[in-house]
Amino acid sequence: MATALAPVAPPAASTRPLLPPLLLLLITGLASSSASLTFETVAKGHSCGIYKPLTSVVRAPSDFVSLWSDHGSDRYPPPLAPVDAIDFEREMVVAVYRGSMSSGGYGVEVTGVEEREDGTLVVTVVETDPPPGATTSAALTQPYHVIKTARSDKDVRFVAVKEDGRAKPDAAAAPAAPFPAFLLSFEKGSDGEAVASRIRAMNPPVSGVRLLGRRIAVVTFDSTKIDQGGAASLLEGIEGVGSVEVDQQF
Protein backbone atom coordinates (compact mmCIF):
# COMPACT_ATOMS: atom_id res chain seq x y z
CA MET A 1 0.00 0.00 0.00
CA ALA A 2 1.50 3.29 -1.10
CA THR A 3 1.97 6.01 1.49
CA ALA A 4 0.70 9.44 0.49
CA LEU A 5 3.42 12.09 0.44
CA ALA A 6 2.87 15.12 2.61
CA PRO A 7 2.46 18.27 0.54
CA VAL A 8 5.58 20.38 0.44
CA ALA A 9 5.01 23.91 1.76
CA PRO A 10 6.00 26.64 -0.67
CA PRO A 11 9.09 28.62 0.35
CA ALA A 12 8.40 31.63 2.55
CA ALA A 13 8.18 34.84 0.63
CA SER A 14 11.25 37.00 0.99
CA THR A 15 10.74 40.21 2.92
CA ARG A 16 13.63 41.85 1.09
CA PRO A 17 12.30 44.43 -1.37
CA LEU A 18 13.12 43.71 -4.99
CA LEU A 19 15.19 46.29 -6.84
CA PRO A 20 13.51 47.81 -9.87
CA PRO A 21 15.01 46.36 -13.05
CA LEU A 22 16.36 49.74 -14.21
CA LEU A 23 18.10 50.42 -10.87
CA LEU A 24 19.54 46.92 -10.84
CA LEU A 25 20.89 47.47 -14.36
CA LEU A 26 22.49 50.78 -13.35
CA ILE A 27 24.14 49.28 -10.28
CA THR A 28 25.47 46.35 -12.28
CA GLY A 29 26.75 48.68 -14.98
CA LEU A 30 28.52 50.95 -12.50
CA ALA A 31 30.15 48.03 -10.77
CA SER A 32 31.60 46.78 -14.03
CA SER A 33 32.48 50.12 -15.64
CA SER A 34 35.09 51.40 -13.16
CA ALA A 35 37.96 50.14 -11.06
CA SER A 36 39.31 51.91 -7.99
CA LEU A 37 43.03 52.63 -7.93
CA THR A 38 45.07 52.82 -4.76
CA PHE A 39 46.86 56.05 -3.97
CA GLU A 40 49.15 57.46 -1.30
CA THR A 41 49.47 60.98 0.10
CA VAL A 42 52.67 62.82 -0.77
CA ALA A 43 51.74 66.06 1.01
CA LYS A 44 48.61 67.54 2.55
CA GLY A 45 48.11 70.79 4.42
CA HIS A 46 46.69 74.29 4.62
CA SER A 47 49.61 76.58 3.77
CA CYS A 48 51.57 76.76 0.53
CA GLY A 49 52.67 79.16 -2.19
CA ILE A 50 49.91 78.38 -4.71
CA TYR A 51 47.24 81.05 -4.29
CA LYS A 52 44.88 80.21 -7.14
CA PRO A 53 42.78 77.03 -7.57
CA LEU A 54 44.79 74.40 -9.44
CA THR A 55 44.58 70.74 -10.41
CA SER A 56 47.65 69.10 -11.89
CA VAL A 57 48.72 65.68 -13.16
CA VAL A 58 52.51 65.22 -13.20
CA ARG A 59 54.22 62.37 -15.03
CA ALA A 60 57.82 63.61 -15.17
CA PRO A 61 60.34 64.51 -12.44
CA SER A 62 61.15 67.86 -14.06
CA ASP A 63 57.48 68.86 -14.05
CA PHE A 64 57.21 67.84 -10.40
CA VAL A 65 60.19 70.01 -9.50
CA SER A 66 58.51 72.94 -11.29
CA LEU A 67 55.22 72.37 -9.45
CA TRP A 68 57.01 72.11 -6.11
CA SER A 69 58.85 75.34 -6.78
CA ASP A 70 55.48 77.12 -6.95
CA HIS A 71 54.17 75.06 -4.02
CA GLY A 72 57.00 76.27 -1.77
CA SER A 73 57.30 79.82 -3.09
CA ASP A 74 55.90 81.18 0.21
CA ARG A 75 59.00 79.96 2.07
CA TYR A 76 62.66 80.92 1.93
CA PRO A 77 64.53 78.94 1.01
CA PRO A 78 61.82 76.94 -0.78
CA PRO A 79 61.73 73.23 0.13
CA LEU A 80 63.19 70.66 -2.24
CA ALA A 81 60.73 68.55 -4.20
CA PRO A 82 60.44 64.99 -2.76
CA VAL A 83 61.29 63.48 -6.14
CA ASP A 84 62.77 60.34 -4.59
CA ALA A 85 59.38 59.51 -3.04
CA ILE A 86 57.86 58.88 -6.49
CA ASP A 87 58.86 56.21 -8.97
CA PHE A 88 57.90 58.01 -12.18
CA GLU A 89 58.43 54.84 -14.19
CA ARG A 90 55.39 53.33 -12.46
CA GLU A 91 53.71 56.24 -10.67
CA MET A 92 52.42 59.74 -11.30
CA VAL A 93 51.47 62.67 -9.09
CA VAL A 94 48.00 64.18 -8.83
CA ALA A 95 47.75 67.53 -7.04
CA VAL A 96 44.73 69.58 -5.97
CA TYR A 97 44.97 73.15 -4.64
CA ARG A 98 41.96 75.21 -3.51
CA GLY A 99 43.78 78.51 -3.76
CA SER A 100 43.92 81.18 -1.09
CA MET A 101 40.96 81.15 1.32
CA SER A 102 40.02 84.04 3.57
CA SER A 103 40.32 82.13 6.87
CA GLY A 104 40.95 78.76 8.47
CA GLY A 105 38.38 75.98 8.40
CA TYR A 106 38.68 75.20 4.69
CA GLY A 107 40.07 71.90 3.43
CA VAL A 108 40.45 69.67 0.41
CA GLU A 109 41.03 65.92 0.12
CA VAL A 110 41.33 63.40 -2.68
CA THR A 111 39.02 60.54 -1.71
CA GLY A 112 39.13 58.32 -4.77
CA VAL A 113 40.77 57.54 -8.10
CA GLU A 114 38.78 55.44 -10.55
CA GLU A 115 39.70 54.01 -13.92
CA ARG A 116 36.70 54.09 -16.25
CA GLU A 117 36.04 51.92 -19.24
CA ASP A 118 35.57 55.03 -21.37
CA GLY A 119 39.33 55.61 -21.19
CA THR A 120 39.45 58.22 -18.43
CA LEU A 121 40.61 58.45 -14.84
CA VAL A 122 38.21 60.17 -12.45
CA VAL A 123 39.66 61.83 -9.34
CA THR A 124 37.07 62.60 -6.66
CA VAL A 125 37.89 65.61 -4.49
CA VAL A 126 35.98 66.55 -1.32
CA GLU A 127 36.01 70.20 -0.29
CA THR A 128 35.19 71.26 3.27
CA ASP A 129 34.13 74.74 4.37
CA PRO A 130 33.70 76.13 7.90
CA PRO A 131 30.07 76.13 9.11
CA PRO A 132 28.34 79.52 9.10
CA GLY A 133 29.24 81.42 12.24
CA ALA A 134 32.09 79.07 13.15
CA THR A 135 35.12 80.48 14.94
CA THR A 136 38.14 80.16 12.64
CA SER A 137 41.63 81.57 12.44
CA ALA A 138 41.87 84.93 10.71
CA ALA A 139 44.93 83.89 8.71
CA LEU A 140 44.72 83.19 5.00
CA THR A 141 44.99 79.49 4.16
CA GLN A 142 45.77 77.54 0.98
CA PRO A 143 44.43 73.97 1.38
CA TYR A 144 46.05 71.31 -0.80
CA HIS A 145 46.35 67.55 -1.25
CA VAL A 146 49.08 65.93 -3.35
CA ILE A 147 48.96 62.17 -3.99
CA LYS A 148 50.74 59.54 -6.04
CA THR A 149 48.98 56.73 -7.85
CA ALA A 150 49.64 54.19 -10.61
CA ARG A 151 51.00 55.82 -13.75
CA SER A 152 48.51 56.14 -16.60
CA ASP A 153 48.44 58.03 -19.88
CA LYS A 154 44.66 58.27 -19.81
CA ASP A 155 42.90 61.61 -19.58
CA VAL A 156 42.22 62.67 -15.99
CA ARG A 157 38.95 64.30 -14.93
CA PHE A 158 38.48 65.93 -11.53
CA VAL A 159 35.09 65.81 -9.81
CA ALA A 160 34.72 68.14 -6.82
CA VAL A 161 32.00 67.58 -4.20
CA LYS A 162 31.20 69.32 -0.95
CA GLU A 163 31.57 67.50 2.36
CA ASP A 164 27.81 66.75 2.44
CA GLY A 165 28.04 65.02 -0.94
CA ARG A 166 26.62 67.83 -3.06
CA ALA A 167 28.30 68.28 -6.39
CA LYS A 168 30.26 71.51 -6.61
CA PRO A 169 28.60 73.93 -9.06
CA ASP A 170 30.24 74.11 -12.47
CA ALA A 171 32.68 77.00 -12.44
CA ALA A 172 31.39 78.05 -15.85
CA ALA A 173 27.90 78.49 -14.40
CA ALA A 174 29.04 80.24 -11.22
CA PRO A 175 28.44 83.98 -10.90
CA ALA A 176 31.38 86.22 -11.66
CA ALA A 177 33.58 87.20 -8.76
CA PRO A 178 32.39 90.47 -7.27
CA PHE A 179 34.32 93.64 -8.02
CA PRO A 180 36.45 95.22 -6.53
CA ALA A 181 39.05 92.52 -5.59
CA PHE A 182 42.07 91.69 -7.78
CA LEU A 183 44.87 89.13 -7.50
CA LEU A 184 48.16 90.37 -8.86
CA SER A 185 51.67 88.95 -9.14
CA PHE A 186 54.92 90.90 -9.06
CA GLU A 187 57.54 90.67 -11.79
CA LYS A 188 60.54 88.51 -11.03
CA GLY A 189 63.24 90.57 -9.33
CA SER A 190 60.89 93.32 -8.21
CA ASP A 191 60.54 94.36 -4.56
CA GLY A 192 57.04 93.23 -3.59
CA GLU A 193 56.94 95.38 -0.46
CA ALA A 194 57.91 98.48 -2.45
CA VAL A 195 55.31 97.80 -5.15
CA ALA A 196 52.65 97.21 -2.50
CA SER A 197 53.55 100.51 -0.83
CA ARG A 198 53.11 102.37 -4.13
CA ILE A 199 49.70 100.79 -4.59
CA ARG A 200 48.63 101.66 -1.02
CA ALA A 201 49.51 105.29 -1.71
CA MET A 202 46.79 105.35 -4.40
CA ASN A 203 44.05 105.81 -1.79
CA PRO A 204 41.49 106.50 -3.11
CA PRO A 205 40.53 104.52 -5.16
CA VAL A 206 42.60 101.69 -3.60
CA SER A 207 41.03 100.60 -0.32
CA GLY A 208 43.44 97.83 0.71
CA VAL A 209 46.51 95.78 -0.20
CA ARG A 210 47.22 92.35 1.31
CA LEU A 211 50.49 90.57 0.57
CA LEU A 212 50.36 86.79 0.08
CA GLY A 213 54.00 85.80 0.31
CA ARG A 214 56.72 87.59 -1.62
CA ARG A 215 55.22 87.74 -5.11
CA ILE A 216 51.41 87.79 -4.77
CA ALA A 217 49.01 90.43 -3.44
CA VAL A 218 45.27 91.01 -3.20
CA VAL A 219 44.18 94.58 -3.94
CA THR A 220 40.72 95.96 -3.19
CA PHE A 221 39.13 99.17 -4.46
CA ASP A 222 36.38 101.57 -3.48
CA SER A 223 33.84 100.74 -6.20
CA THR A 224 32.27 104.20 -5.82
CA LYS A 225 35.53 105.77 -7.01
CA ILE A 226 36.46 103.54 -9.98
CA ASP A 227 34.94 100.82 -12.16
CA GLN A 228 36.37 97.34 -12.68
CA GLY A 229 38.00 98.08 -16.03
CA GLY A 230 39.62 101.22 -14.70
CA ALA A 231 40.93 99.41 -11.64
CA ALA A 232 42.48 96.65 -13.75
CA SER A 233 44.12 99.20 -16.07
CA LEU A 234 45.48 101.12 -13.08
CA LEU A 235 47.16 98.03 -11.66
CA GLU A 236 48.52 96.90 -15.03
CA GLY A 237 50.27 100.25 -15.43
CA ILE A 238 52.23 100.01 -12.15
CA GLU A 239 55.93 99.23 -12.50
CA GLY A 240 56.77 95.83 -11.01
CA VAL A 241 53.29 94.31 -11.53
CA GLY A 242 53.43 91.22 -13.71
CA SER A 243 49.80 90.06 -14.03
CA VAL A 244 46.38 91.22 -12.85
CA GLU A 245 43.30 89.01 -12.51
CA VAL A 246 39.91 89.26 -10.84
CA ASP A 247 40.22 87.28 -7.60
CA GLN A 248 37.77 84.37 -7.30
CA GLN A 249 37.94 84.11 -3.50
CA PHE A 250 37.44 87.66 -2.22
Image: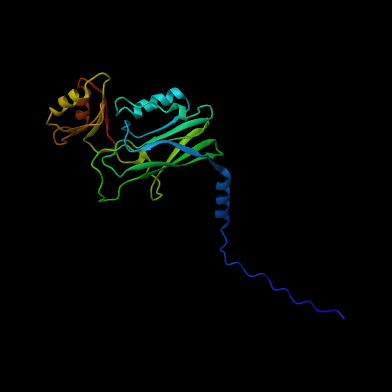
What residue occupies the far right of the structure in this picture?
1
What residue occupies the far bottom of the structure in this picture?
1
Residue 56 relative to residue 205: left or right: right
At which x and y percent is residue 90? 54, 29
What residue occupies the far top of the structure in this picture?
189
Q: Which quadrant of the figure has residue 23? A: bottom right
Residue 97 relative to residue 206: left or right: right
Q: Quadrant of the C terminus?
A: top left
In this rendering, the answer to whether 86 lies above or below 136 is above
At which x and y percent is residue 73? 31, 27
Q: Which quadrant of the figure has residue 230? A: top left
In this rendering, the answer to whether 238 lies above or below 170 is above
Q: Residue at x 23, y 20 (%)?
A: 190
- Frontmost residue, 161 versus 194: 194
Residue 203 relative to residue 142: left or right: left
Q: Residue at x 40, y 46 (%)?
A: 167
Q: Quadrant of the N terminus?
A: bottom right
Q: Which quadrant of the figure has residue 53? A: top left
At which x and y percent is residue 95? 41, 34
Note whether residue 94 is visible: yes
- Frontmost residue, 137 versus 21: 137
- How many numbered discs sit on the rendered protein? 0
Residue 18 relative to residue 166: left or right: right
Note whether residue 144 is visible: no
At which x and y percent is residue 32? 58, 45
In this rendering, the answer to whether 149 lies above or below 194 is below
Q: Residue at x 30, y 41 (%)?
A: 175
- Frontmost residue, 67 versus 224: 67
